[in-house]
Amino acid sequence: MAINLQIKELFSKAEELSQTETEAQVQGWIKTRRDSKGISFIELNDGSCLSNLQILVVEEKLPDGLLEKLTTGSAISVNGILKKSLGKGQIIELYCENLELLGTADPETYPLQKKRHTNEFLRTISHLRPRTNTFGAVFRTRSLLSYAVHEYFNEKGFVHLHSPIITSSDCEGAGSMFQVTILPLDNVPKIEASGPDKGKIDYSKDFFSTPTYLTVSGQLEGELFAQALKNIYTFGPTFRAENSNTPRHLAEFWMIEPEMAFCDLMQDSKIAEEFLKYVITKVLNKGLEDLKFFNEWVEKGIIDSLEKLIKADFARITYTEAIKILESSGKKFEFPCTWGSDLQTEHERFLSEEYIKGPVFVMDYPKEIKAFYMRLNDDQKTVAAMDLLVPRLGEIIGGSQREERLDILEQKIIDNNLPIDHYSWYLDTRRFGSTPHAGFGLGFERLVMYITGMQNIRDVIPFPRTPGNASIN
Ligand code: 4AD
Ligand code: MG
């Protein structure tokens, strides 16, 4: 019986397999074909790893007319014998006994030509984009990272919580939510009865009998479960209807949000640091072939910088210190930064890239620029917030200790002009056995960008959703 393995597995067993002549079957897509003296050399890739398996085909063994159809991009299944390779660069190769052409790819119209394509062009061909070396490597790395995230939290005893995607409350209080409705947009029902609500939209006729949205964060729901299970995390899609057309923003992105009861801001930042180092170590250990590719073709020196990061102690400074550093930097920024203003990407990058030269937690931000749920510090001016800033990217994690005191939290909801009656379920967590608790959110695509060196967030998610674009491409 022929063994049927992914090419990655074949290579991992290459030493052993090269000792014996094993019968094997492989399937994949042709990267290139080169013919020489009656032998055809096919480079086959099946997406399981970056490397191709070389297949040697004796041309006269093929049925008439088949060889010409074995063009770049076509799908084939090959049976043959694995032998020690005589050529350089690979340990084993497959001597073809039988070849089946499963799907042709017309060389006149196949969009992936030998030349290097731009990432923008590749975004327009979603199903072929992952066949390129770069995007194959990106999406394998993304998958490995996702696994590492679950592995870390599982090892630490965190409970994985599936928070809802449809919600009726705005977690971040920023108002940039996508509405979910079945009301007919061209004929929205209005309240007819006389009274203060006359003429307003009649949500009693909508699916949930109340306005609903796609979630911007699973945090609030996460907090509820942390008040019973102590340490939980969510990992799901989140949605923001911000009109931010930048290389760092998506309208649909994935976020990892742990929430820990009996935890303060400092412990929160230590968990964030340990977690980030864990997942990066995993990729350095298990995803090195793809990382080497990024190191050579996407971001020179990236392996070195990741290795430095896992050994470094992350710096911690306050927002107030950050502002002083920025003000005395002598650097001209596009946006001003004075105490009370939010940090822009240029400020964040300066702090981590040029000043600290590594990851830095900025803590204790002015309460006015942060969400309502963050814990008010004793100075009454700042809240127990933290952002982790990293070189090349700026903010990668945002987190905080949460306001566990009911009266202060109620006041903050009112001060933030949020409808307090929508938050009663949340406020209840502060009524019955409230605990000091904290958590953070890591933007998964920002993490993939950081580790691969890819410059545009659209290139690390399979189907990017950005303002003006939700097509399959
Ligand atoms: O700082 P943010 O808005 O924090 C929250 O949502 C909190 N509820 C997290 C928590 O404490 N549980 O978002 C967290 C992270 C950011 O640091 C960034 O990495 C990423 O999510 N992020 C985005 N990524 C891609 N596109 C966007 N539009 C993003 N907005 C935030
Ligand atoms: Mg943030």
Image (cartoon, grey):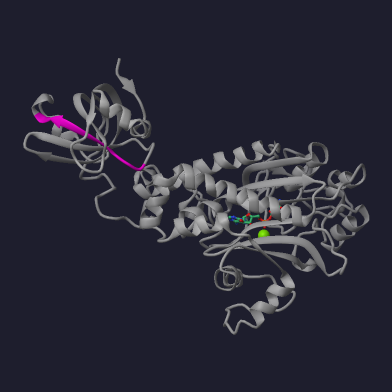
Q: Which residue is farthest left?
A: 37
- Residue 137: give x, y in percent of width and height: 41, 46
- Residue 99: give x, y in percent of width and height: 21, 25
Tally of marks = 0
Q: Is residue 22 above or below residue 421?
A: above
Could you say which is closer to the camera, residue 326 or residue 332?
326
Q: Quadrant of ligand 2?
A: bottom right
- What segment carries the magenta color? 50-59
Q: Is residue 462 visible?
A: no
Q: Is residue 48 left or right of residue 321?
A: left
Residue lying at 84% horizontally and 46% vertically, measured from the top left: 426
Q: Which residue is farthest top?
A: 1
- Residue 142: give x, y in percent of width and height: 50, 45
Residue lying at 74% horizontally and 77% vertically, measured from the top left: 339
Q: Is residue 401 above or below residue 13?
A: below
Could you say which is closer to the camera, residue 282 or residue 160?
282
Q: Is residue 288 magenta?
A: no
Q: Is residue 191 above or below residue 400?
A: above
Could you say which is closer to the camera, residue 452 or residue 75?
452
Q: Is residue 84 above or below residue 409?
A: above
Q: Which image quadrant is residue 329 in? A: bottom right
Q: Is most of the magenta stretch helix, strand or loop?
A: strand
Q: Is residue 263 left or right of residue 63?
A: right
Quarter the N terminus occupies? top left
- Residue 248: give x, y in percent of width and height: 54, 60
Q: Is residue 292 visible?
A: yes
Q: Is residue 297 left or right of residue 326?
A: left
Residue lying at 39% horizontally and 42% vertically, measured from the top left: 127
